[in-house]
Image (tube, rainbow, N blue to C red):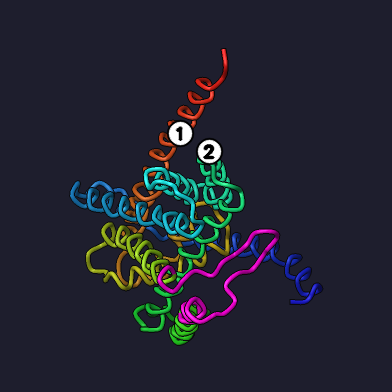
């Protein structure tokens, strides 16, 4: 990309993002007017305790899997940190990331918590980079298979047709295979970006990234699937979630508020009622976003209190 092209992209990026966001608001407002809110309230009240417990259990599994991304990072940087130190950092960061954006959770929170564990700034950046790579590499591989298989059918009138989605899926599969091939065969294993050395992981580590990343996205879809009407198939729910993830990244809205709902209602309203869809997604936000955030907040306050106690103890009288 030339300098002129880059500056032109930066100039148009913000207006296009705002336009997309406004379009999303209009779309969601139109959908909201056509939703039977009495059905939403009734569906929320009809959820069985067993269903909510299953969704909560799947959420816990998903957060633990995401926290394991940082365990790969520990191996990557070669620093002897205990898993009991790393998993809380991953859990707290993920909860804040989902609700308050990547800058707060994924970056700022990780830097603060890992610096307390004696990890250097360069190594924190490596852990963060590997975690991001694990998440999106798993997404690419999983979305590539789901999209290219034709499990998700786009409604008539959408700008992206089913055939185009299959083409995108094929490209994602090729990109995933290319990453694995690079990890196995690339002769150059290290690059330096702004003073931070980036090392290409081994094929074994890349396969672990793929497995954990794909598993986390699959568990997220399983939580939603548990809370949506029973007539929907899991592969379809998974595919719609993967599509909504891209829309959430484009808009940069914390927690993807409104984006997830708009995409699910837009793609699945011909399968089940809008009210039952929205009720399931509201329950999903409560279980997957709000509850873990409250737990993470308590955990973070505990970490801060423990650190403060250690500082007071070390301070000479």
Q: Is residue 177 above or below residue 87?
A: below
Task: Say what secondary structure mark 2 lies in.
Answer: helix
Examine the image and state in which quarter residue 111 appears: top right
Task: Say what secondary structure mark 1 lies in.
Answer: helix
Indicate yes or no whether the magenta region holds residue 198: yes
**Quadrant occupied by the N terminus:** bottom right
Residue 9: tell me if it is visible. yes
Q: Which residue is label 1 attached to?
A: 303
Q: Position of residue 239 (x, y in %)?
A: 38, 72
Q: Position of residue 10 (x, y in %)?
A: 74, 65
Mark number, residue 116: 2
Q: Which residues are magenta?
A: 177-205
Q: Earlier in the sequence, mark 2 or mark 1?
A: 2
Give 50 or 229, whichever is nearer the viewer. 50
Name which residue lies at 56% across and 51% down: 124
Nearer to us: label 2 or label 1: 2
The answer to whether the residue labelled 2 contacts the one labelled 1, judged by CB atoms less than 8 Å apart, is yes
Name which residue lies at 54% across and 70% down: 200
Marks 2 and 1, how far apart at CA: 9 Å
Query: In this rendering, would 193 be left or right of 71?
Result: right
Q: Is residue 1 above or below residue 301?
A: below
Indicate yes or no whether the magenta region holds residue 190: yes
Q: Position of residue 188 (x, y in %)?
A: 59, 76
Query: In this rendering, would 5 be left or right of 285?
Result: right
Give 130 or 11, whichever is nearer the viewer. 130
Q: Is residue 16 above or below residue 77?
A: below
């Amino acid at each position: 990309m030339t300098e002129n092209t880059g500056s032109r992209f930066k100039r148009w990026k913000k207006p296009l993002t705002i336009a997309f966001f406004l379009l999303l608001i209009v779309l969601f407002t139109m959908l909201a007017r056509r939703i039977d809110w009495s059905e939403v309230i009734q569906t929320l009240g009809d959820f069985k305790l067993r269903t909510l417990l299953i969704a909560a259990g799947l959420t816990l599994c998903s957060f633990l899997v995401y926290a394991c991304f940082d365990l790969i990072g520990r191996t990557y940087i070669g620093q002897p940190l205990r898993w009991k130190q790393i998993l809380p950092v991953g859990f707290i960061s993920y909860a804040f990331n989902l609700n308050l954006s990547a800058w707060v959770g994924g970056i700022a929170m990780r830097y603060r918590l890992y610096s307390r564990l004696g990890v250097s700034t360069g190594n924190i950046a490596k852990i963060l980079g590997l975690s991001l790579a694990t998440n999106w590499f798993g997404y690419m591989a999983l979305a590539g298979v789901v999209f290219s298989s034709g499990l998700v059918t786009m409604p008539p009138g959408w700008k992206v047709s089913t055939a185009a989605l299959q083409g995108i899926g094929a490209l994602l599969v090729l990109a995933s295979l290319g990453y694995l091939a690079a990890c196995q065969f690339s002769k150059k294993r290290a690059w330096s970006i702004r003073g931070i050395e980036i090392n290409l992981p081994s094929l074994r580590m890349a396969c672990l990234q793929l497995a954990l990343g794909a598993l986390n996205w699959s568990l997220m879809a399983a939580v939603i699937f548990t809370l949506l009407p029973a007539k929907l198939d899991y592969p379809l729910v998974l595919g719609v979630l993967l599509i909504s993830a891209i829309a959430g990244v484009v808009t940069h809205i914390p927690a993807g508020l409104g984006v997830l709902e708009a995409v699910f209602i837009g793609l699945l309203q011909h399968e089940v009622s809008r009210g039952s869809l929205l009720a399931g997604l509201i329950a999903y936000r409560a279980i997957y976003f709000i509850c873990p955030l409250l737990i993470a907040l308590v955990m973070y306050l505990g970490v801060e209190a423990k650190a403060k106690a250690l500082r007071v103890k070390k301070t000479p009288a």
